[in-house]
């Protein structure tokens, strides 16, 4: 039995229940960009080049699969829902792959090190499960929050809980270090946090959230329709901006621990606490960004965030050497800008998906988010591959206690600062002249809702 009605606004508890899977997703994103590459290089016997190549190879295989996954989600129709099925299917895949990464069988090890093929296989499976969780939540959120301002609110909630997950896994290695455990054990404890949180939060989201299936009006499509999607000006803006803006922080994350410990004079505990400040800034940054977007429009708010983030990074070399209290305010401001990127890029993608659905008569939301997720993955892999390759070229030694030359440390600093500043500013510039503002989106939603009301939108009952 289904009911027909327009999408209804959710209460704050319902929004938080829906956003719950942001907790393990945020935790996993941080672990993958900051701690796991270093863990593989420092504690599992793999070289920087092997780790960088493994991540790049996984992306080369995984990225083309994301649009196919998004397309499959958009075409799924069942009494149980469209995106709900995928939200439940992702966590078991992530759990199994993460466990396999931590506990490789003896026959898969080579000379005391995990083989590159095994690392690539586990990462590929893990990323497929991650994509199912991530894309289903974003596409589902678009239908839950149809209005311009409601979009910013629900994506801010997702990012807010993602920040909570990131903070949780950052606290873990600090606590483990205080208890006398090694850095490797701290990273493994992070992974166990994700393994436990993923299924629990997915079940909470599915149990508490109804799903509206927007009707399709165009009953036939061809492959050229998907190619045409990539030629739309707003999609090109979105993809280019997402690639640049995600590449900047990903570049910074890949070098963060190396730079702050070997060049800026912080010990590992201080560096992790500064990273905690950076990530925890999202608690205030995400809702503040939603407020700013309602007043400036989302694309202008995004340009404010990219500018403030870049200015913060420019100031990092002028910080006192090894002084935590001097560095913390700057990391707080940079972190608030970073959380703003995440909220606004997702909200902008949802608005563009509405524009495309109005013009084509078909649901494209999953595919739109899949394309931006593909660019995010490409940016993350490119950041690890490029930065680790640069460090290898300048002779930087990543091993604990290694004595690096002044040339290697100078190369580390240039690499750490140049990439994030240049790419983040380019990402903001992508939205100069953007026309899909609050007024235009309100008109699009009026037309969509009138058409949906005429044809009927299905709301499967929660199980």
Image (cartoon, rainbow, N blue to C red):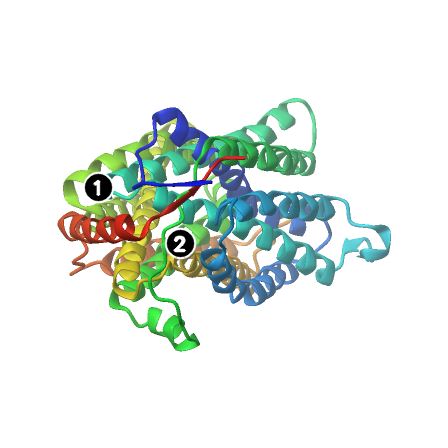
* Viewer-side residue, 72 vs 106: 72
Q: Which residue is mark 1?
A: 293
Q: Position of residue 148 (x, y in %)?
A: 23, 44
Which residue ends up furthest to the front in the rendered image? 1
Picture quarter containing residue 19?
top left
Q: Position of residue 145 (x, y in %)?
A: 32, 41
20 left or right, relative to 300? right
* Viewer-side residue, 72 vs 387: 72
Kind of element beneath mark 1: helix
Kindly tell me whether residue 272 is visible in this rendering: no
Q: Is residue 140 above or below residue 424?
A: above
Q: Which residue is mark 2?
A: 246
* Viewer-side residue, 327 vs 381: 381
Which residue ends up furthest to the left in the rendered image? 439
Kind of element beneath mark 2: helix
Q: Is residue 369 above or below residue 43?
A: below
* Viewer-side residue, 368 vs 46: 368
């Amino acid at each position: 039995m289904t009911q027909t009605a327009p999408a209804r606004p959710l209460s704050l508890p319902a929004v938080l229940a829906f956003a719950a899977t942001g907790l393990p997703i945020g935790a996993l994103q941080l672990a993958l960009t900051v701690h796991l590459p270093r863990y593989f290089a420092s504690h599992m016997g793999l070289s920087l080049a092997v780790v960088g190549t493994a991540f790049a190879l996984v992306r080369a295989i995984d990225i083309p699969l994301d649009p196919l996954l998004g397309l499959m989600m958009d075409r799924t129709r069942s009494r149980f829902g469209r995106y709900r099925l995928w939200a439940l299917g992702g966590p078991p895949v992530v759990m199994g792959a993460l466990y396999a990464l931590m506990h490789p069988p003896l026959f898969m090890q080579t000379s005391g090190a995990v083989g590159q093929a095994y690392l690539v296989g586990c990462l590929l499976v893990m990323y497929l499960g991650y994509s199912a969780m991530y894309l289903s939540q974003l596409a589902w959120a678009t239908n839950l929050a149809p209005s311009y301002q409601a979009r910013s609110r629900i994506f801010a909630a997702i990012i807010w809980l993602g920040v909570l997950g990131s903070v949780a896994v950052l606290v873990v290695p600090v606590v483990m270090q205080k208890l006398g455990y090694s850095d490797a054990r701290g990273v493994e404890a992070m992974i166990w946090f994700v393994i436990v949180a993923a299924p629990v939060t997915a079940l909470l989201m599915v149990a508490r959230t109804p799903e509206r299936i927007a009707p399709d009006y165009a009953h036939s499509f061809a492959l050229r329709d998907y190619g045409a999607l990539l030629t739309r000006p707003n999609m090109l803006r979105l993809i280019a901006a997402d690639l640049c803006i995600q590449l900047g922080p990903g570049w910074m994350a890949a070098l963060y621990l190396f730079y702050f410990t070997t060049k800026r004079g912080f010990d590992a505990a201080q560096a992790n606490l500064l990273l905690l400040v950076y990530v925890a800034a999202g608690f205030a940054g995400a809702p503040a960004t939603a407020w700013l977007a309602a007043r400036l429009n989302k694309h202008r708010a995004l340009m404010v965030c990219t500018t403030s983030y870049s200015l913060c990074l420019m100031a990092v070399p002028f910080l006192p050497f090894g002084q935590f209290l001097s560095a913390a305010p700057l990391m707080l401001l940079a972190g608030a800008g970073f959380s703003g990127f995440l909220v606004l890029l997702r909200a902008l993608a949802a608005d563009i998906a509405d524009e495309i659905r109005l013009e084509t008569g078909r649901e494209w939301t999953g595919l739109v988010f899949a394309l931006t997720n593909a660019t995010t993955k490409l940016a993350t892999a490119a950041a690890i591959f490029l930065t680790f390759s640069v460090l290898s070229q300048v002779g930087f030694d990543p091993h604990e206690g290694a004595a690096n030359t002044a040339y290697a440390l100078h190369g580390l600093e240039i690499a750490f600062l140049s990439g994030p500043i240049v790419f983040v500013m380019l990402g903001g510039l992508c939205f100069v002249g953007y026309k899909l503002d609050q007024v235009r989106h309100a008109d699009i939603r009026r037309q969509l809702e009138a058409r949906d009301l005429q044809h009927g939108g299905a709301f499967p009952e929660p199980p």
